[in-house]
Amino acid sequence: MAAEPQTLFLPNIGAEESHRSGKTLAQHPVVIHLGELWQKSFGLLTESTGDNSSSHQNADWDDLPTAPGLLPWFATQATFLEAQERGLPHLGPQPQIVQTIHNKGFAKQLAQTIGHNTGWQYSHILQCLQSEQEAKSKLEEILAGWPQWAQANFTIKPCMGSSGRGRIAGKNGLISTQHIRGLMKMSQRGGAIVEPWYSTINNLSTQIFFKPDHTWNICGHTSQVLTQSGTYLGNHGRLVQGKSDSGTQYDSQLEQVAQSIAPLIQEQGFEGMCGFDAFSFLCPETGEEKFRAPLEINARFTSATVGLRYMRHLASQHSIDYGSWLFLLDAREAWCKVAVQNPDWKSWIIPTKTTGKKALILISEHSEILKQWLVENKLRP
C-alpha cells in the first residue's frame, strides 16, 4: 500500500540573504532549533484538544496546508525548483511576489500610501549604484540634507536583510570605506536603506495570514523580547478573548495599520503567512514618543509565528482566554526552572532533537505578571 503523500517542510531560514552561504547559516544551532520548532508546530494543529469553544477553534489561523507539497520558510526560486525536482507542488506564496513584498522599499511605499510616514521622513532607498564613487557621492548628499541629530547616529542596511544582519552603523556624519563599499554592494543586492538610527522603546510585530480565496486574517500582535543590547530572544503579549495583542498602548494602531496594508499586500497576489514589524521611539526633534509602522514586511514565517502557534495550543489545553503569554526561543535552564516551579503559570518546555536547545512557553492569567518577570531579569519587554 503506497504511503500517503505528506507536506515537506523546508526551513530555509535566512534565505533572503542570497549573498550569504545558506549552508553556513543552516548549520547555526539556533537556526536549526527554530526550524525544528516551526516544523513541529504544524503537527500541533492536527491534535484534538477536546475544546470546542469559539475562542479555541482558532479560525484566524486557518493556515494548514490543504494539499501535500513543499512548504518553505521563505519562498525563493531555489525552493520552487526543488519542489519541481521532487515532483511536489510548491506551497505558499510565489517567489517573485515574495521578492517584491519582502523588500524594505515596499514597506516604505505602504507607509506612504496609508499616510503613516512617521520614522520614514529621512529614509533613502538606493538601488544599483555602479561604483564606489557613486556610493560615496550619494551618501554625502544624504547626510548633508539631514539635521545634525540624524547625522550623529545613522545606519545603512540591506533591503533584503534578515534579523538585523548586514547593518553598518555610522557616527557623526563620518563616512568610511566600509560605508561606501557596503552601500554599493547592498544596492546591487536588492537595494539599501540609509536612515537615522532610532532608539526604540516598544518593538512590536503583527502576523497576518493571506488565504487562497483572497481574504486574510490578522492572527495577532506581539511585543518582542530583547536583551539590553537589542538581541532578539522571543515574543510576549496579552491574551484577550483568546487572541494576542502586544500589551501596549499601540494595539489599536497596530490593528489599524494591519487592516490598511493587508489589501495592498493581497493585491500583489500574496498567499501565506506574512508579518510586519513596528516600533515606538523617542523623537529626537520633539522629545515625544512616536510610532513607526510598518517598519518592514516579512513575507515569510517568523519566530513570532512559531511562538504564537505554541502559545495558542497551550492556552487551548488549559482553556485560558485572558492573561499574558511569553515565548523564549532559546531558553536558559534557570528560566525553565523558575517557570516549572511557579504554580500560577502554565508552562511548556519544548526541546528540539538536533541541538538539545529548549524553547519556553509561559501563560499566566494575570495580564502584567510576565512582563514584570522580564524586567526583573533585565530583559526588554
Image (cartoon, rainbow, N blue to C red):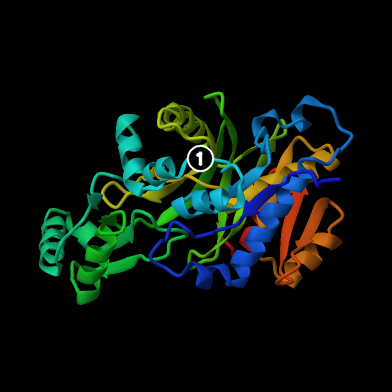
- Which residue, given by chain and number where applicable, does mark 1 sit on? 93
**In this picture, residue 218 sits left or right of residue 320:** left
Q: Where's residue 26, x and y in %?
A: 56, 67
Q: Amino acid at mark 1?
A: Pro
The structure residue drawn at horizontal position 59% and vertical position 65%, both measured from the top left corner, is 31
Q: Residue furthest bottom?
A: 177
Q: Say if residue 237 shows up in the picture.
A: no
Q: Quadrant of the C terminus?
A: bottom right
Front position in the image: 288 or 186: 186
x, y percent for residue 223 = 56, 48
Q: Residue at x 47, y 60 (%)?
A: 163
Judged from this view, the residue extending furthest toward the right is 50
Quadrant in which the N terminus is drawn:
top right
Q: Residues within 10 Å of mark 1 (few under 14, many from 20)?
A: many
Residue at 33% in and 58% down: 158
Residue with the most extreme front position:
1
- Total numbered badges shown on the rendered structure: 1
Residue 255 in picture, x, y percent from top left: 51, 31
Q: Which residue is drawn at the image coordinates 16% and 54% (left, top)?
A: 146
Q: Position of residue 365 (x, y in %)?
A: 78, 43
Asked if residue 60 lies left or right of residue 57, the reply is left
Q: Work out whether residue 318 or residue 216 is closer to the camera in this orientation and state it.
A: 216
Q: Secondary structure at mark 1?
A: loop
